Amino acid sequence: MSHDEFPTDHPAVVTCGLPYANGDLHVGHLRTYVDGDALSRALRRIGQQTAFVCGSDMHGTPVAVNAAKEGVDPREFALEYHETYAETFPQFNVEFDNYGHTDDETNTELTREFVRSWIDNDHVHEKEIQVAWDTEEDQPLPDRYVEGTCPYCGEHARGDECDEGCQRHLEPGEIEDPVSTLTGNPAEYRAREHKFLRLSDFQEYLQGFLDRVEGTDNARNQPREWIEGELQDLCITRDMDWGVDYPAREDEGAATEDLVLYVWVDAPIEYVASTKQYSERVGADEYDWEQVWKVGGEERHGTAWDDDWTHEGGEVIHVIGRDIIQHHAVFWPAMLRGAGYNEPRSILATGFVGIDGKALSTSRNRAVWADEYLDAGFHPDLFRYYIATGAELDTDVDFSWDRFQERVNGELVGNVGNFIYRSLLFAERNYDGTPDTEVSADVQKRIAEAIDDFETAVREYNVRDLAEVATALSNYGNEYIQSEEPWNLVDDDPERAEQVIRDCVQLTKAVAVLLQPVLPGKAERLWGQLDEQGSVADVSVDAALEAPPAEFDEPDELFEQVEDDHIADLNAELRDRVAAANEDDEDGDADGAEDAADLEPLVEDRISFEEFEGVDMRVGEIVTAEPVEDADKLLRLEVDIGHETRQVVAGLARLHEADDLPGTRVILLANMERAELFGIESNGMVLAAGDEADLLTTHEDAPLGTRIK
């Protein structure tokens, strides 16, 4: 692993968090894989040798529990989902170089090799721990067979993770008030011997690793709190049948015979196994997995680390959901180091995906499922564009059919598609293709700048900027052709008309090259319309400046308008499905635990008291309220905050009647940056809670202008 600027001389591998073979895929899952696929394609585009690998996570208690409910073997149950995933990803143009699973022979053997290395290097010890026990079934309760209360934040939690609260990993025996998911009865704790990876051996290393690892801020900073003070060792075994057997030595006794390895041991090792399978398929001359993962050659591999190993190996890039940061930024680097493998260069943790402004809820069927999107008849690249450009990588994205339509029609149809179609159609009808002249210096410079922006986005792992480079270039082309009006120059100034269209065809080719990582299907189609040879996937970024073919046929339109009626039907279907799921909720807690899951997650980054002191919130009163012309959601407010009356634009029109608002007490964020919305300056922000915009106010009549402390 190096920290050299991409492209480097070392091979790279991009991985995505393994989908758990226990349910259908939805848009929340797909975000990680779309981002990983786009980044992989972009790395190749700038000349970085790259493999993109993943696999299905087959083991663990949820698979065992659900397989038992269906009366099938866990492997059979998990393989069915694995095969579904393997078929679904290509339908979203997510194309892994290798897609394996954790129960295959390669991963099983590599997992045993890892654990044997830890044992040989004295990183594994045995300890008696308290394990939850179902007294009625007379059996231990690993992981998801037990639920209870998180000892750290008090929220409801699963046996291995506080999934509804602080998202901490939980060790066996930590969960409070344990309840068996098998019988619903209270569980009791009993002493059992288990194996632990001594994470304390790697504490100093992990502190250094977090200083040098690249990636999103949440992946680099959040783990620091987990490695401060005493670092808890990781229990690597479980009492169950389904999983990779613990590779016991002869002197470890019969107590280990019933133990399997914890799912978070063999799951990340699948990254290595899948890379190895790819290398074995294409040959080490084309891609050598050992150059990526192994450090120092076979003579040093599998032994204790030396400090000078840090900069050896290939470029390992993990794209994951932010709920598994601890596993990838703490457990996984320690596991790799303990076995003599290369550490990750970067960890990119994506934000969550919400639905129509609310948290995604699979239990309430409030989700847009992968097959639902495909059944709607939309091209996969439209989803890829929406999800990649919806927010920065580590920020939450909201999926809404209405916003999907707005983005597609405005940015892809109205901008990219409009520029490409009008340019190529005019070129074909007037010149049979590319006019016989050189591209202008100004357009050549603008494309070169776009290439620089593209390369910068790749090196900064900024998928959003990566996607927007091509749309920005297309927007430049639209302004250029509109200002020059070549249709009016053909007779009056034919040389100028020829120059303009030559430039526009070159811009179109550049858009195809730069658009490909995010919209690979549409870019390939555009490549064909230009009558370019080969595949756009195989060219370098510099192809954006190479001359297009002299001749090409009349184009057709690259994107189609998303119609209102279609979106209305999809919205109605989603509403009806959610309503039906709520009606079927027979446990009586529709407003309880499930509502807690609907809340937006707490912001992970804390602010200091000094930073809070800089937030100036004031008691105010709305004096006037009126709709903003051409804006369905906005009201123009005048708010008296004692010292002065502020003009504020607020998104309250659909939730509050303008005539009812004058005289309403509110809280105003007074030192908010000024903004302009629909030509109206907004000088502050009125605070409100939730989707219903419940306006914040004071309990008593504090004077206007009183500061909130």
Image (tube, rainbow, N blue to C red):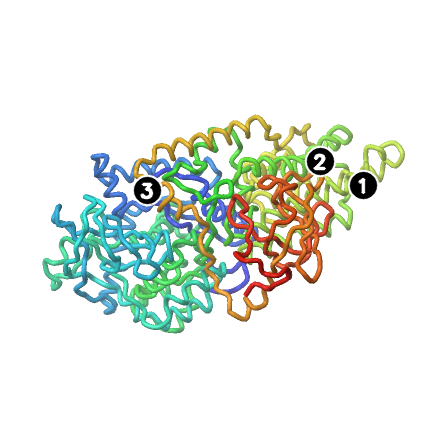
Location of residue 189 (image quadrant):
bottom left
Tell me where residue 324 sits by quadrant: bottom left
Crowding around mark 1 (Cα neighbors within 10 Å: few <14, some 14 to 19, many 20+) is few
- Relative to 420, does residue 614 appear above or below in the rendering? below
- What residue type is disc 2 on? Ala
Judge by depth and name the residue closer to the eye, 605 or 235. 605
The answer to whether 576 appears left or right of 670 in the picture is left
Looking at the picture, which amino acid does disc 1 mark?
Ser
Residue 534, can we see it?
Answer: no
Residue 118 percent location from the top left of the image: 26, 64
Residue closer to the observer: 86 or 438: 86
Question: Is residue 298 or residue 464 the one in the foreground?
Answer: 464
Q: Is residue 524 above or below residue 461?
A: above
Q: CA distance from mark 2 to mark 3?
A: 50 Å
- Crowding at dot 3, Cα within 10 Å, few <14 / some 14-19 / many 20+, comes out as many
Does 150 sit above or below residue 277?
A: below
Residue in front for this viewpoint, 430 or 298: 430
Compare marks 3 and 1 and give the one earlier in the sequence: 3
Number of the front mark, 1 or 2: 1
Q: Is residue 392 rendered to the left or right of residue 1?
A: right
Q: Could you tell me if the residues under marks 3 and 1 are in contact, i.e. CB atoms within 8 Å?
A: no
Label 1 vs 2, first from the N-terminus: 1
Residue in the image at 40% along x and 59% along y: 291
Q: Which residue is mark 2?
A: 550
- Report the Cα–Cα distance between label 3 and label 1: 54 Å
Rendered image: mark on residue 364: none
Residue that mark 1 sits on: 483
Question: Which residue is label 3 attached to?
Answer: 21
- Answer with the quarter of the image where residue 615 lies: bottom right
Examine the rendering and report whether any part of residue 500 can be seen: yes
